[in-house]
Amino acid sequence: MWGKRTGYEKEGRRVSIQFEGGTGRIEVVNAGVINVFAPLHTQEHESRAVEQPNPAFVVCDYTVSERDGRIEIVTEQLIVRVYDHFKVDFYDAAGTPLCLDYRGEREPFPRRGNVSIAEGEGHAAMRTSEHHKIQVLKAMEGEEKFYGLGDKTGPLNKRGYEYEMWNTDDPSPHVESHKSLYKSIPFFITLKERAAYGLFFDNPFKTFFDLGKENSDYYYFGADGGNLDYYFIYGPDPKNVVSRYTALTGRTPLPQLWTLGAHQSRWSYAPESRVLEIAEKFREHDLPLDVIHLDVDYMDGYRVFTWDDERFPDPAALTKRLGEMGIKVVTIIDPGVKKDRGYGIYEEGLEKGFYATDRDGVPYVNAVWPGDSVYPDFSDEPVRRWWADNQKIMLDAGIAGIWNDMNEPASFNGPLPDDVRFKNDGRGADHLEIHNVYGHLMSKSTYDGILEASGKRPFVITRAAYAGTQKYSTVWTGDNQSFWEHLRLSIPMTLNLGLSGFAFNGCDVGGFSHDCTPELLARWVQVGAFSPLFRNHTAIGTRDQEPWAYDEDTLDAYRKAMKLRYRLLPYLYDLMREAEQTGLPPMRPLLLEFPEDEHVHELDDQFLFGSRMLVAPVIEQGKRYRAVYLPEGSWVDYRSGETLEGGRVILAEAPLDVCPIYVRAGSFLPAYPDQKYVGELKIKELLLDVYPGTGEYVHTQDDGESFDYRSGSYNEYRFSQSEQDGELEIAWEASHAGYDGETYASFRLTVHGRSASSVELNGEAIPFLAEIRGTTFHVPAGSGKVRLIR
Ligand code: GLC
């Protein structure tokens, strides 16, 4: 289509390049991020993911020249070469090729046999892939690995797989052949021997990704609508790619502390007496709990923003009573508004023209839980405002967060036709363009509404999402099943979500459909304990999935995992702060920390919690041990305290109540004492587990709920440790003092694996307790230095 180059122009950060067949554009977002654009659908970006003003757009010097039959754009970090036919190649500053357009035609591997015979028997036989209007082919060198793309099925490394981005509500078992699920995050990271880079195809239409499945000489992405609009995001290490991608599409704001506690759900806890019973049982069984979710049956006939009078006669009284037990309530909401004369919300939206329509402007009707329903047009600002304002109805009843479901949008009477019309903030668009951003826009509006009504950090959880939704909402991976295979799958799914910008994510712990066995629940909770969003949720008709519905061993294992999670809450909270600052997810694949270690590139049955803890859960029935790969360095077995040298595979024992965990030498892990819920205790003393070695750690404390920390209302402590002549020295300083709420008076340090003969604080001996597992002592918060003398 493009043909030969006929000229170019540089204007500000953009270089427009004329070809015989049209104009393409290269935009220098910053020295390491380049946008490639062609106005095939709109003249300018119409992005829902990249909002402006945007911190990633930084003015930087670059040069443009024309030579050897190409245009060369040079920034401090990258060289971009543009050739005839709009072929674009990326090199690092030293001229090493990073990502080159493939010069040949698509040539799928041959497929043999008569497909129609197979189809006649009901097999889904593979056909050669289709060609797309927009198609970008990139050359493969052979060693590339691919990560990201949101929560797709399949392994961590997506090489050799194909996917589609079309938000889909698919309750059938999630298996490797699924190309689309609930979210569309058209971003992936390529890891090569020399460097990592990311590609973000910011096109909300249905998009296609083939990562070497069709042919191992190239990989490609494409679409049949929208613009050619992709970002090349340089590393060179994968952490930088994630940071740069999240600077562009936004980062997960620090959540309220309680949202990191345990959430309990089922379809549905109702009536209110059942909700109270659940709350009491958690307390009775000494199980920490912060949140109960109310699924669709709290509503009056599934009408959004209403309550069922019989089941929930006084929601405000219920939330108050639960609040006294330290438990918050989150309610589900679906976008579908029941088509029902006399129902205020429906009538108001109808009168104001707030629903998506058919081509004649008549509100489009499909069916969801309430039966015939209409779809609010979230692509239009007045509708987002209306929905945002309505959040107050729920917040006034004491609801602490909102769970957005069925917002792909789901529909029971077949898919929404392609040409359902949306206002799209004045530009007008068909369903084809809005579908993948529908849940994103609903979540944005929910976030804004909660923020205005509460003034606190909003808690939204959404099933459908697009790139950038992480700014507004946490996500879960939708309707999984209580299968061991789905526990296993949840790890690569959530790790890839984390790499795709969604630092705050989780899955239904225990599995949604089917009955969870006792052993599966015990093992699932050991993984869930580390996922930023922890929610045990199950479907209608399944057996009870609360831990006390099982035997004592399961209950014990569950309690143990949850207590560990609550102990580590200050660490998780620090990790969420890190996520806000850098985009790095708390739960991360090993390749993020050890990109040079090839052994970890495909590891997706163990993961890191922050950079310091390695978690190797058991995800197979009947297993009481497992192989664990420890990267180079010294690691301490969290349970036994034994120090192990890495760079090898070890065999870990894992009885039912044990999840093997290893901590890197030189780490500090902040911890809280046992609590039933976040905020039960006023924590005057922070616990710190110290694993000897060399290292630093930053811990912060704030009010845990408002955005005041952004204007300086937080305290920051910097810890460091180093060893000299066998003596460990630990220093800390209050590096920022801006929060004057409940602050720490002291720290209780436990130095693992060290039995000291004396401990000196600023040169003076202090009392300590030396035990086999380590040495414990108390020091005042503020600043100081201790020496541990052997
Ligand atoms: C959808 C959700 C699930 C919820 C159910 C009923 O299937 O994914 O979590 O329980 O709807 O609302």
Image: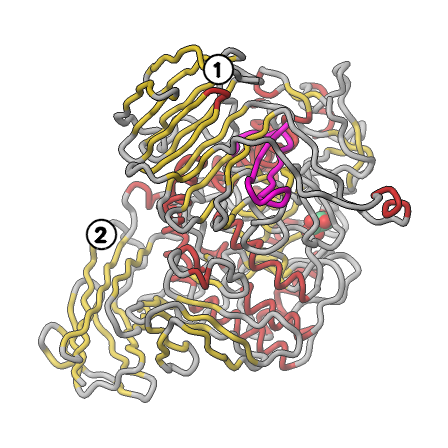
Circle 1 sits on which residue?
4
Please tell me whether mark 2 sits on a helix, a strand or a loop: strand
Q: Residues within 10 Å of mark 2 (few under 14, many from 20)?
A: some
**Could you say which quadrant of the image residue 592 lies in?**
bottom left
In the rendered image of this protein, does residue 552 appear above or below residue 139?
below
Residue 736 image label: 2
Disc 1: CA contacts within 10 A as few (<14), some (14-19) or many (>=20): some
Q: Is tag 2's residue or tag 1's residue first in the polypeptide sequence?
A: 1
Residue 134, by quadrant, is top right
Measuring 25% from the left and 49% from the top, which residue is drawn there?
738
- Which amino acid type corresponds to the residue marked 1 in the rendered image? Lys
Relative image position of residue 244 (x, y in whole percent): 38, 40
State which region is magenta: 201-223
Q: Nearer the viewer, residue 134 or 31?
A: 134
Q: Amino acid at mark 2?
A: His
Query: From mark 2 to mark 1, how far is it between C-alphas?
Result: 58 Å
Q: Quick check: 776 left or right of 9? A: left
Where is the C terminus found, in terms of image quarters?
Answer: bottom left
